[in-house]
Image (spheres, rainbow, N blue to C red):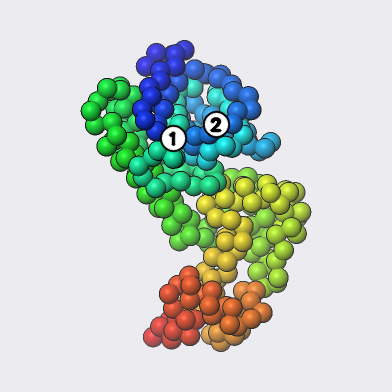
Amino acid sequence: MKKGKDISVSFDGLYLIHQNLPGKQVQQITLQEALLFIPLQGEISIILEGEALQLGVSKMLYLPPNLTHSFSSTTKSGERLIALIDSNKSQGSFSSSVPLILPVDHLIKELLFYLLLHPKTNNAQSLIQVFCETLHETFMQTSSNYIQSVEHLEAKASDPRLKIALNYMREHLAEKINMNDVARHSGLSSRSLNRLTVIETGLQPKQWLIHYRITKAKELLRLSGNSVTQVAFAVGYNSLGQFIATFRTHTGQLPSEYLNMAKN
């Protein structure tokens, strides 16, 4: 599609835009619809409350409704798809209340391009439903992948302040950790820490800490030879009952069952 043009089509519950406008800038906008940005060439930058999110052709960015943001794209190349999704009319349950950087899903891209090029298709609503369901599956898979790889989330975090925050929690794992202290140590406000952690890991800071503690507990139960009580204290639980309940919630097993299985 030609450079320097916007092409847009409207459906019930979905508005699609194809832009090939390098250097495009939009200042401080708030929309009632959810937004999905898919860069096709170049990079885009989204500013949320002073924090810049940058992504290129391998990523998608989801923004929930009513989130004030500004937008800019690289000057040499700037082609992208933008979907405005009315969550009240969408036929699939896909909503997320926080911004999410997601891996590009090729089915989503193909569906949006087809709708863009065939705006009068009789199958529009069926295709929109498939789009919403696929986006929901992408949310779920991304969240699952982050949880499964919680030990390696420091490597996934691109913001240096977030890396400092995650490392601080690792180093103080056995202690009672206050998120205000974590934010202060990493040079972030509590609100910015929360937003950055969610965007880059898919988890709230407290959720990240819980998942890391349980991951570390599983490692210690397998390898250290320590008792369940010793492991509970080592990963920051002063209450054995709370540790057992949390471990069971996240693994489906009691710590003692996991320990016995590891021994066998």
Identity of the residue drawn at 52% across and 29% down:
43
Q: Position of residue 229 (x, y in %)?
A: 59, 85
Identity of the residue drawn at 44% across and 35% down:
85
Identity of the residue drawn at 29% across and 27% down:
114
The amino acid sitting under disc 2 is Leu
Crowding at label 1, few (<14), some or many (≥20) Cα neighbours within 10 Å?
Answer: many
Q: Secondary structure at mark 2?
A: loop
Q: Position of residue 199 (x, y in %)?
A: 56, 46
Q: How many marks?
A: 2
Q: Quadrant of the N terminus?
A: top left
The answer to which of 192 and 156 lies nearer the viewer is 192
Q: Secondary structure at mark 1?
A: strand
Position of 264 relative to 75 (above/below): below
Q: Quadrant of the C terminus?
A: bottom left
The answer to whether residue 249 is left or right of residue 185 is left
The answer to whether residue 216 is left or right of residue 142 is right
Position of 38 relative to 224 (above/below): above
User: How far apart are the alpha carbons under marks 2 and 1?
Assistant: 10 Å
Q: Position of residue 17 (x, y in %)?
A: 43, 24
The answer to which of 158 and 144 lies nearer the viewer is 144
Marker disc for residue 31: 2
Residue 233 visible (yes or no): no
The amino acid sitting under disc 1 is Ile
The answer to whether residue 27 is left or right of residue 146 is right
Residue topped by disc 1: 85
Position of 183 relative to 254 (above/below): above
Q: Identify the image quadrant of residue 125.
A: top left
Residue 116 visible (yes or no): yes
Q: Position of residue 9 (x, y in %)?
A: 38, 22
- Of the two numbered discs 2 and 1 on the same chain, state the one appearing first in sequence: 2
